[in-house]
Image: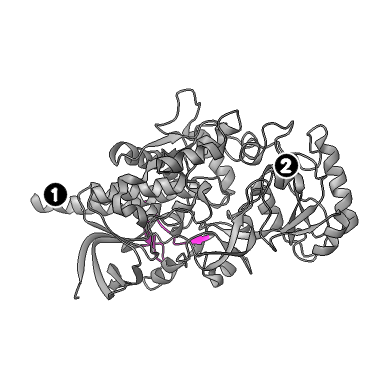
Amino acid sequence: MQWDEDFDVVCVGSGLGGMSAALTAAERGATAIVLEKFDLLGGTCALSSGQLWLGPHHLQSDAVADSDEDADAYLTHLSQGFATPDRRRVFIERGREALRFMTDVIGIEMAVIDKLPDYYYPAVQGSKSAGRYVEVMPFAASRLGALADKVLTSPYGDGYSYTTSNEFVAMQTGGASVVEALQHHLKAGERCAGAGLAAAQVFAARERGVVMRTSSAVTELIIEDGEVLGVVVKDADGEKRIRARLGVVLATGGYDWKPDFVRAFDALPEAGSMSPPTVTGDHIMMAARAGAIAVPARAPSQSPIFLGYKVPGEKIYGKDSYRMYLPGVPHSIAVNRHGKRFANDGFYPDVATKVARFDGQENGQPNWPAWIIFDQNMLDKYGMSPSWPGMELPEGMAATADSLAELAQTVGIDADALAETIKRYNGFCSDGVDHDFGRGTVPWGRIMTGDPNLLNPNMAPVLTAPFYAVKIERVTMGVPTAGLPIDVDGRVLDVSDQPIPGLYAAGNSAAWLDIGGGYNSGIANTRGVLYGYLAALDMTSQRIAASERNSA
C-alpha cells in the first residue's frame, strides 16, 4: 500500500467528537489529524448552545444533591427501553471523567449553568433543578491568531455565538439583558456557546500539534483483510491516502442534508436543517463497506427533531434558511389546521412530539400542518428571529390580517374554532393558569422562552391586530434517529456485533444506544466529548500495551 501521509489517529470531522478524539490522542503522545469537509472548523457543535449535560461531575456545587442513581433514573425514563444499561452507565460514570480530562488536563474552562433545570424537572424521577448543565467560559478569539477566521461561528446572527446560557438564565431573574451581554462579548471579541467551545478545542489542538485541515472530504475508508488502515481524502490538490496506524474516528455528525436518510430514518418527507451543509451522512456510507449498518436507536418521534420556520429570501450556506422556533413566547400560541391548540405550547419537546403524532382515523397526522399564531404585541415586545423587537418580519415569512377570521381563511384554518381557541386561551391569561395544557408549568420552558415580568412567564393574550400566522416546519440540528452501532469504547460494530478493527465513531455519527428514546439539551454534546475521548483512549492504550510487551 502506498501512503501519502502517516498519522496514528485520523479523525473525520471537526465537531466535538473528532476534536475530542484528536486532543486525547495527542495528549497521550500520538500523532493526530482532523479532516473537515466544510471550509471551517467546528461542526454542528459550533452552531449549538454549547451546553453539556451529564450526571454528577466535579464542577457541581456541594449544595447540589445529585447521584449516579438519580441520573440513571432520569435517563432510564428518557430512554423508554431503547438504551442498554451498560452503555447508560458509561455515559454517567465516564462522562464526568471525560469532562474532567477536558478541563483539568486539556485546560478548557467550563462552568455550571446556574439555575437551569433538567427538561422534565420536577415531573420525572431523578430530575434536578440545577447543576447538570455545563458550558464553556467566553473564549477570546484573539488567542487563535490566524486560525480565528477558520473556526465556525453562527451565520444566524450574533446572539447564537456571543452570549452564554448563564447570561440568558440570569436575565430571567433580574440580571443584565441578553442584548447587553451580546454587546459586551462582541466588544471584547469573545466567543460563547458552541462557537466558544469549538474555538477552545481548536486552540488546545494547535497547542498539541494536531494537524487540522478544512475543505478536505474523506471519501473512502481503506480496508484490508477486514481492518481499517486509513482513508482516502479529496482536497483542492486531488486525492491522498492517509494511513491511520491506530485507527480512524468517524465523527461527521448526522445526515441532515441527505434527504433519503432523513426520510428513511426520521420519517420526515421534508425537513429543513440548521447544520452545516456538509452533514450528509458520509459516515454511514463509508462504514457500510467495512461491514457496519446504521441502526435506529429510538422511534423517530422521540428524536430531537426541532420546530422551526422558513425565512423567505434568506440564504444560509447557499440554501433556503430555516430558523428554530421555541414555543412559549407570550402573546402567541400553536394551533393545528382545525384551529385548536394541541400541546403545552410553552415547552418545545411537547409540541414537537404532538405534531408528529399519527392516527389513521384522523387523516394521518391530526396536528400537522401547524401554525404559530401571534399578535402585534408579540412582535413589538419580543420579535421573531431574524427580526428584533419592534421590527417588521421579512416579506413572505408570515400571513397577516386585521382579524382572526381573515387570517384563518388565508392559511386554511377553521375560523370559528380558531376564534374560540383564542378566546379560551385569553381567558386563561387573566389568572395565568392554562387549564387545558399546563403552559408555563415546566420550569425549563419558563426560563427559556418566558417573560419574568408576567404572572405566568409564558402567557399573555393574543389581542392586538394585526394578527400573524407562521407555518411550523420540522428542522433537524444534527441529532439523528440512526447512527453507527458502537461498543463502550467507541469501536464500530459490524452486523455480527463484532468490533471492526481500526474503526471508531463518536458524537452524532454513533447510534444513541446509551441514551435511547428521549432527549435533554446538552446530551448530544456530551456524547461527542465522551466517545471521542474513549475512542482515543482505546487506540492509544493498545499502542502503549504493545510497546510495553516489546520492551519486556
- List x then y, in percent, for residue 483: 47, 61
Q: CA distance from mark 1 to mark 2?
A: 64 Å
Q: Main secondary structure of the magenta part?
A: loop
Determine whether 178 is above or below 281 in the image: above
Task: In this rendered view, identify the residue nearer to me: 214 or 517.
Answer: 214
Task: In this rendered view, identify the residue nearer to me: 223 or 111.
Answer: 111
Binning the other alpha carbons within 10 Å of mark 2 as few (below 14), some (14 to 19) or many (20 upward) gives many
Q: Is 384 situated left or right of 192 in this image?
A: right
Q: Which residue is mark 1?
A: 548
The image quarter in which residue 273 lies: bottom right
Mark 1 in CB contact with mark 2 (< 8 angstroms): no
- List x then y, in percent, for residue 198: 39, 50
At 40% from the left and 64% from the top, the residue drawn is 38
In this view, the residue farthest toward the right is: 416
SS under mark 2: loop
The image quarter in which residue 222 lies: bottom left
> Three-letter amino acid code at disc 1?
Glu
Q: Which mark is residue 330?
A: 2
Binning the other alpha carbons within 10 Å of mark 1 as few (below 14), some (14 to 19) or many (20 upward) gives few
Q: Report the magenta residues as a range.
A: 482-499
Q: Earlier in the sequence, mark 1 or mark 2?
A: 2
Q: Residue 486: within the magenta?
A: yes
Determine whether 280 is above or below 64 in the image: below
> Three-letter amino acid code at disc 2?
Pro
State which quarter of the image contains the N terminus: bottom left
